[in-house]
Amino acid sequence: MLANRVLNISPETLTKMATTIDPAMNASNPAAASPASPTVASDAESSPLLQRRRTPEDAADYVTVSDPVIHADGMNKYTSFRVDCRPPLNDPSTASATAANNPVDVFLQNNPGQYSSVLRRYSDFLWLYERLHKEKAGAIVPPLPDKQAVSRFSPEFVEDRRRALEKFLRRVVLHPELWAAECLLTFLRADDVGFQHAKNTSKMEDGNGGSNHGGVGGESMMSGSLGGAGAFNLAPKNKAGIKKWFSEAKTTFSGDLVTSPDDDLFDEIERYVEALAIQMKRVSAQASGLVRKSKEIANGLFEFGLAFHQLGQSEGEELGAKLQLVGGTADRLSSMAAQQAEAEFRRLEEPFKDYIKIIFAVKLALNRRQEKRVSYTALLHEIQTREINLNRLRMTPGGEAKAYSTEMSLQRYQAAANVAQEEYAECSQRVLREVDRFKREKAEEMKLVVLEFIKLEIEVNRSMERAWGELVPKLEEGSIDVG
């Protein structure tokens, strides 16, 4: 029970923590002395240590996800969110300031005053996520919050999901490769009928009713429609076995995949991403351990202070008063340590967990290029096979009709191969741009995270040292009558 009083931080405790770090806070900020609001997040914002730093996606603060509403439609229970996009008008008086604050917000520059407000549920966000992978193959699509089967309608989970969906959508809007995607504009602006039509159309394009994260449903439809006996089916029979399909495809092609001048560079990128993922998981685990230790320290100080309070009540007046002073200081330090743990979670543990998800997004972008490479190779090998069949039919008496049909099919495959080659090249170049951007942004973000963590530790330790220092002269005053 004692641990719960420290680890499960209530809004009232957060307010107490804020005033503990800075006792002058109540005098300078009357709002800090008022009763805490129902949400923990608002209390966190009033605390110097828990105040959330401004992140790059906050530049798109005109995109909001709000007003979650739980719907119970028979057995189908879900939560809807209001999605607002309200980019400000291009006011000449503020144009220079906007350009300075959001130098990379191309969406804002191309959509001034394009207001929209729609209702969307999690499955709609998932549709957007999957369509972005298809429309902009090779882009590093921002991570989407994971699905959850239990407790998904609790107020805490709904609020966490709302924040995560808002973060995802703002990142997409600011993304240099994704901001103009047709599916994004559909998601932001289409009414219910139009949006459902877009979802149904995309299902038909995919060739099945489910998601196609790792598969190549679009390519399989293209191949199947080319005609001719023995048309090559590019779709894996089992979507869950995509890796196995890749290995089987290489064997079926009876040769290596097509090569490009950048293959060595992509091999180097893959090794870099794999190594980075391993190191980031280690750092994330240590950050989680650090937060856990801070919570344990907060709990220990709380119990220490409680013990001294009880001891002070059983002793004489002067000794008891001094012992209770020690207990009171330990209470203050416990609040500081609990606040430190929460700040470390927000400023250290959460960013590293987010990095791991983004690294996985980089892997998905590389996989998209591999899919395009396999599709292009499949068409080339099919063309080669059909050319051999065509030459044989031309030399066979009475095979003119079959030769003509094969030739028409061959032409369609050659046209499809040209499209696949362009898509493969476009995807490859997009991946290279994205990896370069990822490295630059990661370096800058990592620097900010480390610097903020160092400043946090300095601030907390100074506050704790000051609290102990203020206690010493109080304990040294007068003599203690032990009776």
Image: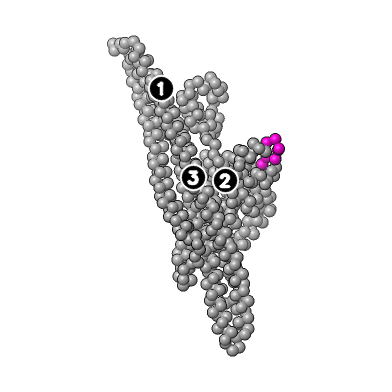
Q: Which residues are magenta?
A: 86-94
Q: Is residue 157 magenta?
A: no
Q: Amino acid at mark 1?
A: Arg
Nearest to the eye among marks 3 and 2: give it: 3
Q: Earlier in the sequence, mark 2 or mark 1?
A: 2
Question: Which class describes the residues within 10 Å of circle 2: few (<14), some (14-19), or many (20+)?
Answer: many
Image vertical order of residue 400 relative to residue 6, above or below: below
Q: Quadrant of residue 304?
A: top left
- Is 146 or 109 nearer to us in this picture? 109
Dividing the image into 4 quarters, which one contains the C terminus?
A: top left
Q: For the point 61% across and 78% down, which residue is it?
A: 407
Element carrying mark 1: helix
Image vertical order of residue 333 relative to residue 348, above or below: above
Q: For the point 63% across and 56% down, which residue is it?
A: 199
- Asked if the residue at tag 1 contacts the one at tag 3, i.e. Cβ–Cβ closer than 8 Å, the answer is no
Q: How is the image coloured?
A: one colour
Element carrying mark 2: helix
Q: Amino acid at mark 2?
A: Arg
Question: Which class describes the residues within 10 Å of circle 1: few (<14), some (14-19), or many (20+)?
Answer: few
Residue receiving disc 1: 466
Spot occupied by residue 84 in the image (x, y as percentages of width and height) = 65, 43
Give how far apart the Cα atoms at labels 2 and 1 are.
Answer: 41 Å
Left or right: 479 in relation to 91: left
